[in-house]
Image (tube, rainbow, N blue to C red):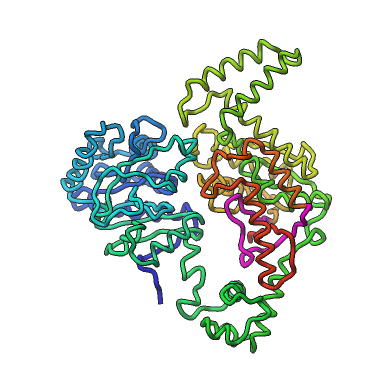
Amino acid sequence: MSIERIPTILVESHDDLGGRVARRMAELIRARAVAGQRAVLGLATGSTPIGIYRELIRMHRDEGLSFANVVSFNLDEYYPMDPGSIHSYHRFMWENLFSRIDIPHANVHLLRGDVPREQVESECRQFEEAIRAAGGIDLQLLGIGRTGHIGFNEPGSGAESGTRVVTLDLVTRQDAAADFFGEENVPREALTMGVATILEAREILILATGEHKAAIVRRAVEGEVDHEIAATFLQRHPNTTFYLDRAAAASLTRIATPWLQGPVEWTPDLTVRAVVWLSHETGKAVLKLTQRDYAEHRLSSLVAPHGSPGALNGLVFNALGARIRGRSKLPRDQRVICFSPHPDDDVISMGGILRKLVENDNEITVAYMTSGSLAVFDHDVRRHLDFMRRLASERHMSEPTVGDLARRVEEFLARKRPGEVDLSEVQDIKRVIRETEAVAGIRTLGLDDRAARFLNLPFYQTGTVEKAPIGPADVAVVRALLEDVAPDLIFVAGDLSDPHGTHRMCKEAIERALCEHVAAGGRRPEMWLYRGAWQEWPVTEATWLVPLSQEELRLKIQAIFKHQTQKDTAPFPGPDEREFWQRVEARNKGTAAELDRLGLAEYFAMEAYVVEQS
């Protein structure tokens, strides 16, 4: 029996989610047009709806979907905020949707973040009146924040709240810090539709993607209504649907512990997950679980096919043990490509196995897919410029050339606004800084400089946090590398918590390139997925667990230290404020400690990988 209080639909991928929601919106728009009526849409901003808007634009271009009968109302806007700012939701909507469809300008309603303080209340009142004049919202699109906010209805927002100015929660401002190039640049207030305004919509579609949303999704869907978590008020709405990708749904009971909801089909994977869960619940090692433990936790049906708890315990113990792969069981004398979305994901996520693969005489290429230039502070540019000026003063470089470059860069940086696209010279300096750090990192692990390949994929080269979609040019670059190296094994970032989706987009480019490569007669390499700085594969999901000694973990951390621009204070720290090396140490030791708790062999640290089936 389901314990979900909001109807919830799981989709397999980010693109599937966008397509499915866009089709529902198109269905409504067409139905209203046939009836001679307007479709009133409530729209949201952020990375998750972008896929929806791109699909709607495609449907307008290729299928003739008209928006002439659409009236739109956007959820929120930062305050204060110039409509022309790159951070403005006003600009976001025009660039990502409105300017590319045939919606009448007069039908677009956006909260204004540039009105004087004394006019804010009037702006909010007029917005509510416009919604009523349009006949109310037919379909409202929502996302969900880590605080459980919908719109900018932060903890403490009442169910009766209307459109108003709100003070943003600290967590919300931290999550927005990357978009604003620093938390100090994030506005402290915003204008938002209220909970009551949202709940008056006739249909609500709420979306979430990524592992970092899993905990709040479960709270919103399965927990009690709580005024500290605005999304829980959606449980009272008669026509709300939650759309989730697998990562965002991971903590729901039907996904995490489906046996607690009723009978299940006991597959090998589910069996391992259930026994490991029981081990945690009881605080016992796997081999010490008893019939009583299984019975008290509603798992008797799991024991029955195996005849006894001992047989089941031994089966799971051996299955987990078989996943451990030391150096002697790792590939040897093969061609390997490690695809690194940013110039530090390689050492952060798989520095340990890279060292072992070097020792096993594999031919390794580390392919850095993007420049990572956005994650370099301006003060690092100034520091490197000072280095070049000093070198020039010692007559080791051309002083006029260095002086001219330094003058142009310094003049730009002096007038630069937060988030402004960098001068091309500044972008180049930041890119080269990241490249030198990447080479220093792999040298630490024993790789030659020539192992580094900098792909600099076009989709990343927008100069802003927002990226272009993966296109044929990106795929062509990756395919050329595959054809040049002809790898036996590739490592790919498989995590879904990257705040801006770069890891997901890089994986898309690799998968598309592989399809073209194989279609042209190339051999498909084995693919191992690693995770980035935010998460690690659980031992129940990992295909292989690679032990690291104390010395190997120390070497891995030293390689991470070579990325000096990401040290101490990373520009894009994500929800975890610890430094990357601290997260790595904790997660690698944590994976080893998990096996120890389950009663398996004790190791100092471990990396985890999933082999993706072709």
* Residue 549 among those drawn in magenta: yes
Residue at the left extreme of this rendering: 133
Q: Which residues are magenta?
A: 527-551
**Could you say which quadrant of the image residue 17 lies in?**
bottom left
* Closest to the observer, 572 or 304: 572
x 58%, y 23%: residue? 425
Residue 519 shows in this picture:
no
* Residue 111 among those drawn in magenta: no
Q: Is residue 484 left or right of residue 103?
A: right
x 17%, y 44%: residue? 129
* Closest to the observer, 58 or 609: 609
Q: Is residue 487 left or right of residue 80?
A: right
Compared to 95, does 45 lie above or below?
below
x 76%, y 16%: residue? 396
Quarter of the image where the C terminus is located = bottom right
At which x and y percent is residue 168? Answer: 37, 45
Residue 377 shows in this picture:
yes
**Could you say which quadrant of the image residue 111 lies in?**
top left
At which x and y percent is residue 134? Answer: 18, 46
At which x and y percent is residue 226? Answer: 34, 62
At which x and y percent is residue 369? Answer: 63, 40
x 46%, y 45%: residue? 175
